[in-house]
Image (spheres, rainbow, N blue to C red):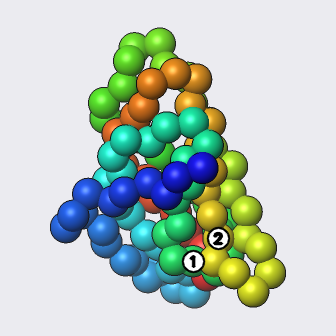
Amino acid sequence: MAAVAETAGTRRDLITGNLRGVKADLTSVGDTDTWTPGLSTIQFFTFTPTLAAASTQWAATWTSPASRQGVVTFAIESGSLEGTAIAWGN
């Protein structure tokens, strides 16, 4: 389980009402890799692949452990992905 690298200069922190958001381009996303966007609670997450094999299936789950930052864990069928991730939470 490796941490995913954010492409330099692509991270954006957003605030809407009482929610914080983080947007970043991620590179070399493989199976069981993780991304920690810096939110204590993740309420919504989306990922849009921009570079992947045509048949690559992917999924992601997110957890918000007590007294820790929320973590997104990827499940990639094969190979690796690049794309844009967005997480909303607190």
In the image, farthest residue toward the top: 55
Q: Residue 75 vs residue 50: left or right?
A: right
In the image, farthest residue toward the right: 66
- Whether 77 is drawn above or below 43: the answer is above
In the image, farthest residue toward the front: 1
Q: Residue at x 61, y 57 (%)?
A: 72
Say which of 29 and 43 sits in front. 29
Q: Residue 40 vs residue 3: left or right?
A: right
Q: Position of residue 67 (x, y in %)?
A: 75, 86
Name the amino acid, label 1.
Leu
Name the amino acid, label 2.
Gly
Q: Which residue is mark 1?
A: 39
Tell me which numbered mark, 1 or 2, is placed earlier along the sequence: 1
Q: Are marks 1 and 2 in contact (CB under 8 Å)?
A: yes
Q: Residue at x 38, y 63 (%)?
A: 23
Q: Residues within 10 Å of mark 1 (few under 14, many from 20)?
A: many
Q: Residue 82 vs residue 16: left or right?
A: left
Quarter holding the C terminus? bottom right
The CA span between labels 1 and 2 is 6 Å
Q: Position of residue 20 (x, y in %)?
A: 51, 79
Q: Residues within 10 Å of mark 2 (few under 14, many from 20)?
A: many
Judging from the image, what secondary structure is the residue with disc 2 in?
loop
Judging from the image, what secondary structure is the residue with disc 1 in?
loop
Total tally of numbered discs in the picture: 2
- Whether 13 is drawn above or below 55: the answer is below
Q: Position of residue 5 (x, y in %)?
A: 37, 57
Q: Which residue is mark 2?
A: 70
Q: Residue at x 52, y 85 (%)?
A: 17
Q: Residue at x 19, y 67 (%)?
A: 9
Q: Position of residue 80 (x, y in %)?
A: 42, 31
Say which of 78 and 58 sits in front. 78
- Whether 86 is drawn above or below 55: the answer is below
